[in-house]
């Protein structure tokens, strides 16, 4: 193997035989379509540094032409820095000896050894090179016949080569199977589109297994005659599941790197920040001082003051559902991130905020979401956010092992002179068993929040104020109302020092803040004035969630002023989230997206465990299960919903390398899961009680 290190090269080599002298067989056009699809995947300029350079074999008539191409490309001596994709297409012939041959225009069927090209020899030229990543696609009839040949030839390839490189061979037809000339082009085009839309794979590159899974999904697309599904012939070489440079993911987008990983789970993402600065506010330029968190001055001032104080302590941010607890915490987490503070894109938003509401940069060290997580997962997330790999443990010892590791990290961590490490846990009541978190996580941390603790910590917790113990929570041993989650949290800290409690639903400030929020959201909306904003705020307070939904309906209404005066709409506002969502389901009802289907799509996301539901095959399947019958094209229905205003009810996250979707707020999740009967649109002849038709 060469020892000199050369430049990295990504090379796509195509060996395509498309002229057998029959102008009517359609082969030439079919091969051209294949090559178009292949180059669209591997040489797309949008891939940037992940894109391949195409190398074409000249018109192939004889064995000599293929040998000349191998020599000119120096394929056999490609160095370790190279990644090779070799695409082979043309007529495939099974020989009586069991070998598979690539037929050439000059091939004599009676002299295959002399006049055809043994396909395995061509494949092995790439596999036995020095290239670190190799993918060979053989798209011919009977192509899987090379499997036995490759297995035998493996003994002649060095063991370190087989174990050290990422090598894969894909065949598009079984040993006794023919393949239509255009099938691979169709599969590649479909799979490429899936990866850009429904697959949700977030990695830069794919594994062979992921690539084949998308091709299989494309082959069995609902309503179509299934196409032949390609298969892997060398699944063991290089190890299963490894991602390879040979498979750039066309759906990859660079991650949001604005906020540091330690705070990214809770901080507002860059797309969310941009949304509030421009789209939701109706403003059109970056220098506009509008900012979603421009209200809540007293709440933000108190949270910033807590972070500024030098000693340890505990702070609980609480309020009713939808009252903006997570928004207040996200503002603090986002504004403490040094990269965000220095980013020119958000300078105006920072300078427009009152100085005493700005938390000091760098004063929050780890922030995690508890939603749908156990104590073990939250502990692991905190440890990861603090820059350490979580310890490996299984069974009942897992919690204690992770808890011990976290305490060791907190004992040895330094946040600066006189400044404790600050941890944030938001969505505490949304954990899988929130009452169990108190003895498993909070009680062991609480002593470190005492004023005399050395080293101490600061702990910020976001929790709903109205939770009472649910059945089946193994951590619950206290009766309601004295055993409410907020009460038990406060009591746990009271043993060492009373926590600071900030409420986000105090009537006067909340009404004022929601009015300001609506004013920002509705700036530029025709005929909507201060009086309208005040009236909507009065009907939606204390729910920022309901105010946001109401503003969305006004912004998209044909006549916003008429809607703002509509008594029936005012009645919906008073019904809260249920009434507003029901109205949006009614307004978006259409033959392409019936209201019942839209509701099933949203409910499928609400039932998802973890961070949300992945699209791929899962979201369509769960949607149809919720609906109770099949849909002709579930992917199209989900796409239509995502292109409608109902998409505003969902948010995205990343879990296990996939984009996942869930309801925007836990209150929406509860409504969709538990109260679907209240979301059915009313009969056109019915009017709300006490309201005019």
Image (spheres, helix red, strand yellow):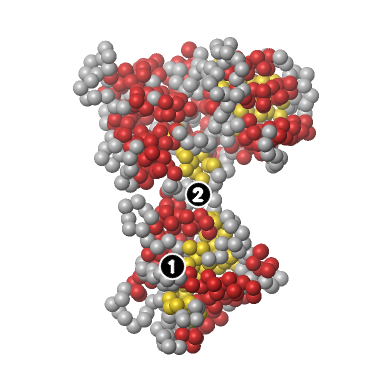
In the structure shown, which secondary structural element does the residue marked by tag 1 occupy? loop
Tag 1 residue: 173
Question: Does residue 526 show up?
Answer: no
Q: Is residue 227 above or below residue 507?
A: below
In terms of depth relative to the viewer, which is nearer, 79 or 337? 79
Instruction: Tell me what residue is drawn at x 53 percent, y 17 percent.
Output: 468
Compared to 294, does 128 lie above or below?
Answer: below
Along the viewing direction, whichever of 472 and 404 lies nearer the viewer: 472
| Residues packed near mark 2 inside 10 Å, few (<14), some (14 to 19) or many (20 plus) | many
Q: Residues within 10 Å of mark 1 (few under 14, many from 20)?
A: many
Is residue 509 visible in the rendered image? The answer is yes
Judge from the rendering whether residue 383 lies leftward or rightward of residue 211; answer left or right: right
Q: Position of residue 33 (x, y in %)?
A: 37, 67
Above/below status of 545 relative to 3: above
Q: Quadrant of residue 552 in the image?
A: top left
Number of the label disc, if any, that sits on residue 201: 2
Q: How many marks?
A: 2
Horizontal placement of 591 versus 311: left or right?
A: left
């Amino acid at each position: 193997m060469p020892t000199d290190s050369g430049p990295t090269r990504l090379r796509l080599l195509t060996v395509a035989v498309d002229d057998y002298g029959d102008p009517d067989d359609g082969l030439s056009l079919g091969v051209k379509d294949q090559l178009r699809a292949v180059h669209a995947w591997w040489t797309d300029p949008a891939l940037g540094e992940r894109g391949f350079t195409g190398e074409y074999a000249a018109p192939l008539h004889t064995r000599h032409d293929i040998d000349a191409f191998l020599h000119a490309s120096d394929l056999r001596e490609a160095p370790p820095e190279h990644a090779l994709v070799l695409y082979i297409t043309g007529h495939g012939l099974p020989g009586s000896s069991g070998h598979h041959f690539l037929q050439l225009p000059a091939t004599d069927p009676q002299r295959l050894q002399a006049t055809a090209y043994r396909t395995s020899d061509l494949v092995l030229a790439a596999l036995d090179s020095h290239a670190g990543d190799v993918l060979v696609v053989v798209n011919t009839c009977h192509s899987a016949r090379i499997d036995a040949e490759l297995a035998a030839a493996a003994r002649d390839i060095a063991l370190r080569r087989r174990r050290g490189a990422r090598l894969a061979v894909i065949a598009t037809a079984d040993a006794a199977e023919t393949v239509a000339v255009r099938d691979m082009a169709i599969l590649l085009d479909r799979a490429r589109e899936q990866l850009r839309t429904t697959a949700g794979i977030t990695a830069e590159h794919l594994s062979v297994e992921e690539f084949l899974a998308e091709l299989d999904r494309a082959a069995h697309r609902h309503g179509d005659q299934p196409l032949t599904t390609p298969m892997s012939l060398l699944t063991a070489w290089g190890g299963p599941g490894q991602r390879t440079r040979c498979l750039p993911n066309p759906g990859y987008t660079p991650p949001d790197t604005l906020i540091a990983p330690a705070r990214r789970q809770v901080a507002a993402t860059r797309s969310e920040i941009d949304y509030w600065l421009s789209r939701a506010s109706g403003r059109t330029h970056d220098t506009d001082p509008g900012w979603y968190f421009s209200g809540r001055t007293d709440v933000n001032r108190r949270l910033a003051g807590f972070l500024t104080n030098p000693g340890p302590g505990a702070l609980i941010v609480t309020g009713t559902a939808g009252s903006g607890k997570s928004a207040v915490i996200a503002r603090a987490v986002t504004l403490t991130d040094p990269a965000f503070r220095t980013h020119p894109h958000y300078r105006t938003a920072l300078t427009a905020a009152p100085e005493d509401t700005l938390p000091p940069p760098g004063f929050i060290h780890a922030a995690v979401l508890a939603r749908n997580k156990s104590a073990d997962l939250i502990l692991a997330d905190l440890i990861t956010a603090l820059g350490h790999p979580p310890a490996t443990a299984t069974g009942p010892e897992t919690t204690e092992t992770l808890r011990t590791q976290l305490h060791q990290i907190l004992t040895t961590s330094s946040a600066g002179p006189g400044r404790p490490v600050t941890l944030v846990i938001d969505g505490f009541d949304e954990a899988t068993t929130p009452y169990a978190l108190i003895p498993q996580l909070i009680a062991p941390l609480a002593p470190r929040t005492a004023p005399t603790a050395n080293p101490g910590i600061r702990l910020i917790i976001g929790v709903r104020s109205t939770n009472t113990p649910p059945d089946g929570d193994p951590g619950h041993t206290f009766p309601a109302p004295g055993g409410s989650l907020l009460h038990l949290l406060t009591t746990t800290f009271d043993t060492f020092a009373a926590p600071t409690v900030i409420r986000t639903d105090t009537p006067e400030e909340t009404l004022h803040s929601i009015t300001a929020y609506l004013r920002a959201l509705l700036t530029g909306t025709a005929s909507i004035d201060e009086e309208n904003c005040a009236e909507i705020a009065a009907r939606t307070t204390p729910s920022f969630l309901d105010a946001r939904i109401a503003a969305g309906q006004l912004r998209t209404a044909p006549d916003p002023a008429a809607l703002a005066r509509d008594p029936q709409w005012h009645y919906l506002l008073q019904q809260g989230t249920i009434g507003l969502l029901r109205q949006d389901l009614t307004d978006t009802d259409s033959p392409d997206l019936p209201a019942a289907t839209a509701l099933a799509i949203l409910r499928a996301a609400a039932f998802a465990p973890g961070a949300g539901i992945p699209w791929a095959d899962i979201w369509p399947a769960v949607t149809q299960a919720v609906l109770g019958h099949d849909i002709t094209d579930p992917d199209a229905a989900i796409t239509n919903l995502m292109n409608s205003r109902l998409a505003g009810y969902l948010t995205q996250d990343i879990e296990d390398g996939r984009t996942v979707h869930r309801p925007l707020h836990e209150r929406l999740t509860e409504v969709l899961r538990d109260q679907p009967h209240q979301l059915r649109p009313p009969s056109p002849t019915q009017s709300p009680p006490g309201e005019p038709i």
